[in-house]
Amino acid sequence: MCGIIGYTGKNKASTVLFDSLLNLEYRGYDSAGVAVIDDNKNINTVKTVNRVQSLIQLSENGEKIQGKTGIGHTRWATHGSPDIKNAHPHLSEKFAVVHNGIIENYSLIKKELIKDGFVFKSETDTEVVPFLLEKNYKVSFLESVIKTVQKLSGSFALVILCKDEPDTLIAVKKFSPLIIGFGENENFAASDITAVSNYTQKIAYLDDGEIAVIKPDGIKVYSIEGKLVCKEIKTVSRESLSIDKNGYEHFMLKEIYEQPQAFTKTAEHYLKKGDLSFEASGLDEVIRKIEKIHIVACGSAYHAGLAAKFAFEELSGIEVNVEIASEYRYSFPFISDKTLVIAVSQSGETADTIAALKLAKEKGAYTVAVVNVKNSTISRMCDSVFYTLAGSEIAVATTKGYTTQLCVLSLFALYIARKRNRIETQQLHKFIEEIKYVPLKMTEVLYMAEDIKNLAYKTVINSSVFFIGRNTDYAISQEASLKLKEISYIHSESYAAGELKHGTISLIEEGTTVFAVCCNKDLEDKMISNIKEVRARGAFVISVAQVGDKNIGGISDKIFYLPRTNRLFSPLIHIVFFQLLSYYIALKKDCDIDKPRNLAKSVTVE
């Protein structure tokens, strides 16, 4: 969620911190701040509840915070409102701290510290950390950190400054992602690789309970017990660090248009010589014995799972439950060694999905990760990992992340069907050919952008909008509704069309906008009835149907015809229409499209 950067080295720290925080803006935040140690061992800070550019202006381009060691942070509020007093870094007499995650036992620690005479200025859980460091500071910076971390419960990534060691950063990780970066006479700590993308390609991932002591001439990593740990340094490709808009007005629009290429790259990775390839140790044996599949995910990844459920069940004949990860471990799920658990996450760091995975592994399930980020926590936890080759996705609202996840899931469903002898070779190749045409059909939808923009600009979209569909069309509706609400701030809801008469239709009144997804030919008669039901109550119906449909247009106020495809794969193509629609509605409203309010790219706390 929040963004962290720490720097120590040969250059002006503020320049590096600001540059890195600008790269982290895609994560979403509501305040920002930096702290730098000067030559006199003073820690100077600047904070804002505006964008990072405001920090640059407030500090007079870094002139007010001179020094070569510092930390920076973009905060998404959890404990305490988004204001200056709660913005990071948080300070004590000798220490400055930035923090991602949640200190679960902070209230108990805070009571103890108040008794010891410490005076709190913020409402955050984070502020207990610098005061606890101060209390534990007897011998050395590192010893104080170790003693402090041993008392903390919860999830946290911490990067810490100490006045007494002005060229040193200490970074600590527990259940919240943190990397260290290696440069020439300069080194880094950061919440993700994009923060250091302009400075180094050499990184290492900290594991839970590890503490990194970072100096300009090197980094040493210790366990929580103080023992040295050897870390593998990885070289990250420049492609994975790319955060250029390439001439597009917003990252979201760029990423919408990158979908055909991202889909092709992902599909080709799992289609070798025209056949499916999912290579993983022991996977085929597991596939033959499993009795059920659980897909666990959050947000759009959850919607990708809902769309893929139809392919898994119809093709493989296996019962599939799609579970919201934050609810999974509290619902007493029935898991055994005959359960395949698929965790879907763009970042691979989604806290709720990680917690769900831990439960699944404890109960003996075989686990598979579908993630975009290599060496992420989820990818390292699972028995097998299948990457979506989407490249960097910067906009908070996912687009190509969703479609590449659904690509992998759809192909994996075919792979399981083949391994369980549930599909004939001719039918398998027919499905594969259908998938190969998906990028071309996505492009056809992209060619409709001007018409979609006109719809967004010329149609009065109410303060409350409804999406209806059935089967795979309902899966499309759920992701479409989320896209609209998260970037345009228009309240929208998705309903299985057959549920309208069970209460929801009471919300339909004169002028209510209803989007009807009617791309499933087998259920068209049912959808026609549902459209007539809402129009009879005064709804303004905008329908999407497949090219060649002759029935939906006559009962809709507006109709858009989308490329024909097998219904199992229609969410891959038809969602592009709604991504563009949401984008242009948000653009019309002058919303902050890439960084919508209150949202973060990677949700690393429960």
Image (spheres, rainbow, N blue to C red):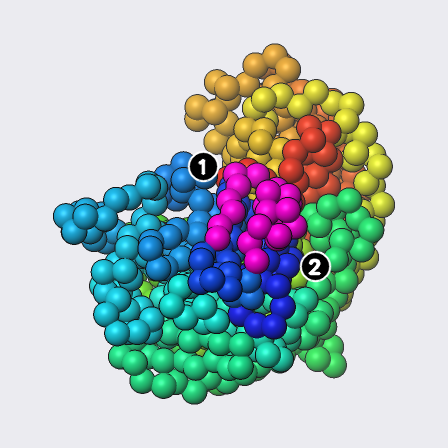
Tell me the tag on residue 98: none
Residue 352 visible at all: no
How far from the left and from the top, in percent, is residue 517?
65, 37
Which residue is painted at 51% across and 73% down in the image?
180
Q: Which quadrant of the figure has residue 285? A: bottom left
Mark closer to the chain start, 1 or 2: 1
Amino acid type, mark 1: Asp
Is 53 in the magenta? Answer: yes
Q: Which quadrant of the figure has residue 206? A: bottom left
How far from the left and from the top, in percent, is residue 424?
63, 72
Q: Which residues are magenta?
A: 44-66
Q: Is residue 205 above or below residue 568?
A: below
How far from the left and from the top, in percent, is residue 157?
41, 62
Q: Which residue is mark 2?
A: 243
Is 59 in the magenta? Answer: yes
Tell me the tag on residue 83: 1
Which residue is painted at 70% across and 72% down in the image?
238
Tag 1 secondary structure: loop
Tag 2 secondary structure: loop
Amino acid type, mark 2: Ile
Q: Which quadrant of the figure has residue 16? A: bottom right
Which residue is painted at 73% across and 41% down in the image?
580
- Crowding near the residue tagged with mark 2, few <14, some 14–19, many ≥20 C-alpha atoms within 10 Å: some
Q: Residue furthest front?
A: 40
Which residue is painted at 36% across and 86% down in the image?
228
Q: Is residue 505 above or below residue 312?
A: above
How far from the left and from the top, in percent, is residue 443?
81, 52
Query: Which of 415 and 253 lies nearest the eye of the viewer?
Result: 253
